[in-house]
Amino acid sequence: MSDAYSGRGNKDRSLGREPGVSQGDPVAKGGAARPAPDGPFLIGDAMTGGYGKGADILHSCTIAVERGEIAVIVGPNGAGKSTAMKAVFGMLHLREGAVRLDGEEITDLSPQDRVKKGMGFVPQTSNIFTSLTVEENLEMGAFIREDDISETMAQVYDLFPILKEKRRQPAGELSGGQRQQVAVGRALMTKPKVLMLDEPTAGVSPIVMDELFDRIIEVARTGIPILMVEQNARQALEIADKGYVLVQGRNAHTGTGKELLADPDVRRSFLGG
């Protein structure tokens, strides 16, 4: 797998939105979005919080991704991986910490306004409209846009050729791996600044997993930073520029993918030796 994963980088922004360019002018729940100091392109910084009035799941957890990177969040079941992703996307209230995108603090923005700011999010489940065709799903992804979407549609079809072949077919009739391609393609139709994927290979075969990872690398090559939660830790770290190992909602290990794969504690505790 490693040979195919070389040469990633910020080479072409055709699928993504130029940094600093937003769709519309979203307003935060607590007022206008606030400028923030320079730092990582996307960061959830020292996040503490949980769902509703329940106990905190995240405890001073920090995750970030730079332009042109693939950053992967791994860890045992119940470690708070998906919760960290949802916190960055604004799906739970942070009691402490902040989220910043492209130099702007967006901690108080709703998920809908974060999409307008350039965040593309693909949840693990219920991420397509099964009764709509593949092409209709992609068109739904462009709902916030007012410009011509045909070029982006063509780019998505170039990235996922099977979707072009099946574009008139109801998405609910596709295989699990093909459905995930529809979900990723729909997120790309927003021309996001950053793409967030919550366990994109859950429930698919190893062959399909490798194919999805190949496509994720291709997305990163267009210049879109990718933040991904993944249950297949070893394979995910092989393609990661940066990795975060979470345990009980806290940062346990942070490093490049290669560093974490070589770390004896990480290998013993999370990768099966």
Image (tube, helix red, strand yellow):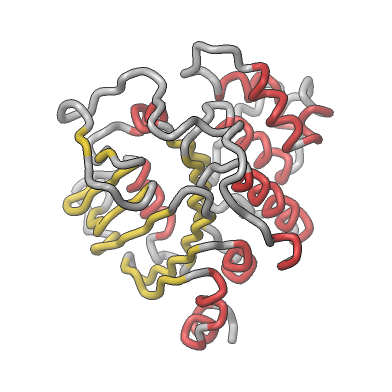
In the depicted structure, whether residue 4 falls above or below residue 225: below
In the depicted structure, whether residue 150 falls above or below residue 160: above
x, y (%) of residue 23? 41, 21
- Residue 2 quadrant: bottom right
- Residue 222 quadrant: top right
In the depicted structure, whether residue 57 falls above or below residue 215: below
**Residue at x-position 56% and y-position 62%:** 240
Looking at this view, name the residue that lies furthest to the right: 165
Quadrant into which the C terminus falls? bottom right
x, y (%) of residue 164? 79, 27
Q: Could you tell whether 249 is left or right of 145 in the image? A: left
Closer-to-camera residue (107/231): 107
**Residue at x-position 60% and y-position 32%:** 15
Q: Could you tell whether 56 is left or right of 154 in the image? A: left
**Residue at x-position 68% and y-position 39%:** 181
x, y (%) of residue 215? 69, 47
Quadrant into which the N terminus falls? bottom right
The number of numbered discs placed on residues in the rendered structure image is 0
